[in-house]
Amino acid sequence: MSKDSESPEAAAGTPRLQVTGLSKTFAGVTVLHDARLRVQPGEVHALVGQNGSGKSTLIKLISGVYSADPGGDVYVDGTRIGTPVRTGRLHDEGLAFVHQDLGLVLDLTVRENVRVGRHAVNRYTRWIDRGRDAAAVRESLEFLGLGHISPEAKVGTLRPSDRVGVAVARALQGRRPGAGVVVFDESSRGIPQESLADFYGLIRLLSAQGTAVILVSHNLREVLHIADRVTALRNGRIVETGVPVADLDESGLTRLVLGRDGDLDDLVAQMPSAASPGGLRVENLSGGRVRDVSLDVRRGEVVGVTGSVDSGLAALAPLLAGRAGGRGSLAIDDRRSDMSNWNLLAALAAGLSYIPQDRHGEGLATALTAQENVTLPHLARRGKRWWIGTGWQKSETDGVMARFAVHPADRNAPVATFSGGNQQKLLMGKWLLDPPAVLVLDDPTQAVDVGARIAVLRAARQAAVDGSAVLLCSHEVDDLAAVCDRVLILDRGVVVRELTRPFTADTVFAEIFPDSERALS
């Protein structure tokens, strides 16, 4: 469906989804205020906002995870379903949700995943009728243009975009074609760049048939590419709703999200630094999908590394940080180490700090406070054997929270209570409290909002200005173009090309996928 066309039902004025006056209060604090939303048939409607803005709370109210405060209502196709929304009746009410983790069991077949809870049963034996289940799954997949997927294939063997299709088939089975609402909650996060076109094609198919689509996304370029209208939330309030995407560009959408300009054009020009001797030198590194990588990053320089999903990029940063065993050699400020003896403690002792992709599993102890997380790596250096001290911990943590605009600015709050973007800011502050010789970042802006993304990239650039050697491993070509002095292209475990400035995000993308058009052009 084109962005300027409108279905007859939309023209008639009955929205697929209408939300009126939804609010949510926790422990006396209102985190969502009087949310109102209308989504028309055949429309792709994006919800945007920083982490903590209220997007997740709104979706959890609509999906029945949370109960709303008294006074709000939810309607689907003009029928009041009320609040709280009953989770067991979401399908019957016309609401379907495809969440970030998809909720699929990789070791089970497509049929088993799609039909869970809705199996056809033999009326006499009460056994599951696999033939009828398989037929129902094939019908759902063919409706979505995914007839090439076998109902008996293991989900773990499918392409990421096909896994999303399986999740959608499960959500839509038994529903009247073109009816209801499908909510994609950060569903594109795990899809490689080269598979995004298939995902967007699936969204267009649903909207063209009259189904309303709500797209929750931090990716502003994605929103501009696929959505028809946008609703923006800030600080628990809807600040703009139903804004036509045709009236926006990336800077305008950024202003909607932040309430100000994003200011992420060219951080290299805005924050120049001079390369100096020392830093990181890697020779003949191998391990996992990395086959033979040699590179160098001088102090005062930000060097990016990128590649396709099977390039070996995911294995590189953990190897350098000592999180995985490898072969080859590594030198920091000309102090050489054999990778066979390299581990996390050796990396820390040599002055290498690592920002992992998994901030929850590897980067932060979410049950501890912000202060405990920020100061933990520095206790031995700052404290004394008989007394670690508390004054410096308080002042340093307050400084990190002020520098990165962490909200709420409560050093004693458990990290688990902070939004994802604020957690990432704390993780950056933790490792930049004492400037490292080498800073290695592994997809640091994944699943963070635009405000946190800017803060993280500015911090990476500032680390280079302060004299660190910064290696940024990232799939985000816009980030690489904004912050890097050089970019290395990884392919099948080896560095195949090096880009030096000037270059653009499109230039970097074309080097990664020389035979493909950019999915978000």
Image: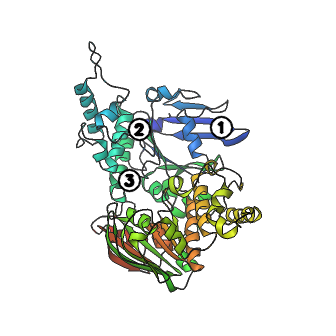
The reply to whether residue 226 is visible in this rendering is yes
Q: Indicate the secondary structure of the residue bearing disc 2.
A: loop
Foreground residue among 253 and 53: 53
Residue at 65 percent across and 70 percent down: it is 381
Residue tagged by mark 3?
Answer: 191
Picture quarter containing residue 110?
top left
Q: Give how far apart the Cα atoms at labels 1 and 2 are.
A: 26 Å
What is the x, y in percent for residue 374? 64, 61
Residue at 40 percent across and 33 percent down: it is 179
Q: Indicate the secondary structure of the residue bearing disc 1.
A: strand
Q: Indicate the secondary structure of the residue bearing disc 3.
A: loop
Residue tagged by mark 1?
Answer: 23
Depth-wise, is mark 3 or mark 1 nearer the camera? 3
Question: Is 16 placed above or below 355 here?
Answer: above
Foreground residue among 210 and 445: 445
Residue at 47 percent across and 70 percent down: it is 472
Q: Give how far apart the Cα atoms at labels 3 and 1 are.
A: 32 Å
What is the x, y in percent for residue 249? 51, 62
The reply to whether residue 256 is visible in this rendering is no
Q: Crowding near pointer 2: few (<14 within 10 Å), some, many (20+)? A: many
Depth-wise, is mark 2 or mark 3 nearer the camera? 3
What is the x, y in percent for residue 166? 33, 40
Quadrant into which the C terminus falls: bottom left
Task: Please state which amino acid type lies under the numbered disc 1.
Answer: Ser
Q: Crowding near pointer 3: few (<14 within 10 Å), some, many (20+)? A: some
Q: Give how far apart the Cα atoms at labels 2 and 3 are.
A: 22 Å
What is the x, y in percent for residue 307? 36, 66
N-term-proximal mark, 3 vs 1: 1
- Horizontal side, residue 72 vs residue 5: left or right: right
Label ID, residue 211: 2
